[in-house]
Amino acid sequence: MTEEHVYKLLTADDWATASALGVTATEIDEADGYVHLSTRAQAAETARLHFAGRGPVRLLRFAVADLPELTWEPSRGGELFPHLYAPLEVSLAEAAWHLMPDAAGVPRMPEEY
């Protein structure tokens, strides 16, 4: 894949854990054995499907070049998603946003991310 950036969405609790540990450690990532990431084109739908109704969300952007090798695997509708089979260090995030929910509870994505 030719993506320059990938994105990680975290609930407030997941962000608190990541801040304390220095790496993301969500329940779904731990259960699946890899870190779930999204491309820019996928992030809004990931937020809608998996983070609606969960309050404020943190969006982190990572440069692909700064991460260990990603594995691209089919997920939603067969679309390829980036997965990281290594710890995701939050210190590698080059940008972060606090996403507040809209009236339907869906995190509002920033205009530029």
Image (cartoon, rainbow, N blue to C red):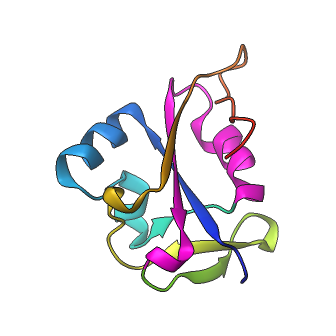
- Residue stretch rendered in magenta on the structure: 40-67
Snapshot quadrant of residue 48: top right
Total marks in image: 0
- Quadrant of the drawing holding the N terminus: bottom right
Residue 68, above or below 53: below
Q: Give how far across and how far down residue 12 sits, in percent.
A: 39, 32
Position above or below: 22 against 65: above
Residue at the left extreme?
20
Q: Is residue 53 magenta?
A: yes
Q: Nearer the viewer, residue 68 or 48?
A: 68
Q: Residue 24: in sight, yes or no?
A: no
Res 51 quadrant in image: top right
Q: Nearer the viewer, residue 23 or 3?
A: 3
Q: Residue at x 67, y 49 (%)?
A: 46
Q: Nearer the viewer, residue 55 or 23?
A: 23
Residue 84 seen: yes
Left or right: 13 with respect to 71? Answer: left
Is residue 12 found left or right of 51 in the rendered image? left
Residue at (43, 57) in percent of width and height: 93
Q: Position of residue 19 (x, y in %)?
A: 25, 45
| Residue at (53% x, 81% y) in the render | 70
Vertical comparison of 56 with 78: above or below: above
Residue 74 within the segment the image draws in magenta: no
Look at the picture and state if 10 lies above or below 67. above
Observer-nearest residue: 92 or 70? 92
Residue 35 lies, in percent from the top left, at: 44, 66
The percent coordinates of residue 32 (x first, y second) are 43, 69
